[in-house]
Structures are given as C-alpha cells and as structure tokens.
Amino acid sequence: MSITLHQISIPLLIKGMQNLSALLDRAEQHADEQQLEYQVLLSARLFGDMYPLTAQVQRASDTAKATASRLSGLAAPNFADDETSFDELQARINKTIVFLEGIPADAIDGQEERQVKMMLRGEEQSMSGLDYLTRFGLPNFSFHVVTAYDILRHKGVKLGKMDYLGL
C-alpha cells in the first residue's frame, strides 16, 4: 500500500489548523476565567524578537496555504494579516481550512518530483515536491502551530500535548 502526496499534506494541514482553532478556544476561555484582557494573550511572545500569538496564527495560515498552493499549482487566497481578536483569527483559520478542503487530490498527487521554486532569505530555492513538503512546508507549518501552543502554555493556559495533537 502506498501513500500519496495529498494524503501526507492536505489532511495534516487541515488537522493542524483545526488544532490551532481549539487552542485559541482554550486561550479565550482561560482569559475569561482569569479576567485577562484578550490582548494579553494575543500580543504575547516567547521572546522579544519572535512573532506574537496573532502573527504565529497568521504564519501558520500562510504556510498551510502556500504549501498547498506550491504543491498543487493553484493560487492561494491572500489575507491581509490584520487580525486583532480571537474571532478574527478563528475566521482566518476557517477560511484557510475552506481553501485547503478545496484542493483536489489529483492536483497534488504525482507532483513528488516536480520542482517547487520559492524565495527564501532573498534567494530562489528549488526542490522536489516531496522534499519541499517534508523538509520545508510541514516543518515550517508545525513550527508556527507549536509556537502558538508554547506561547499560550507559557501564559498559563492549561494545555497539554494531547491538545497540541488534537486528541
């Protein structure tokens, strides 16, 4: 039995976005219970030179869209990166999931060897579709989701590994 490029990309990206949505639900609930201003969590960072929670969610969304777009050749929607509330971040997550769900399997399957080109640190990079997905797309996506988790955990939101995994 073989696994397809679509099977190891789109469902994982959707699941990650759904998990991120659940993390934000827990964060909002925590803020309500602790009588915290939402902005305390939305603007929180792990370290001064890292993105805040809002930008981590935006980057996770952008990476999911870009990964699907680069693998499929279909244009991804552009979002303005102007979300400032939990509701707006949830709306962005939902729009991202809708885009991902619309990517047909046959647009991705068979693209393992096709060269994917992208600009990275001002230089054009090229790698096979499979290498792009496994060495850049999924790791980069996971980085932003786990960093959002880490920010919330650091700020006292009661989360555990199963929350990150969505189990």
Image (cartoon, grey):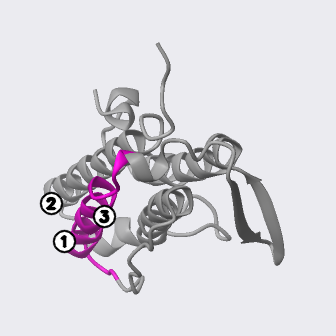
Label whose residue precedes the other's in the sequence (3 or 2) = 2
| Residue drawn at the location 72% of the way across and 65% of the way down | 117
State the SS at label 2.
helix
Measured as percent of width and height from the top left, residue 40 is found at 36, 70
Above or below for 45 versus 37:
above
| Residue drawn at the location 56% of the way across and 45% of the way down | 138
Residue type, mark 1 in image = Asp
State the SS at label 3.
helix
> Which residue range is magenta in the image?
83-105
Residue type, mark 3 in image = Phe
Quarter of the figure that contains the C terminus: top left
State the SS at label 1.
helix
Kindly indicate whether the residue at mark 3 contacts the one at mark 1 (C-beta within 8 angstroms).
Answer: no
Label whose residue precedes the other's in the sequence (1 or 3) = 1
Where is mark 2, residue-wise? 32
Q: Nearer the viewer, mark 3 or mark 2?
A: 3
Q: Residues within 10 Å of mark 3 (few under 14, many from 20)?
A: some
Where is mark 1, residue-wise? 87
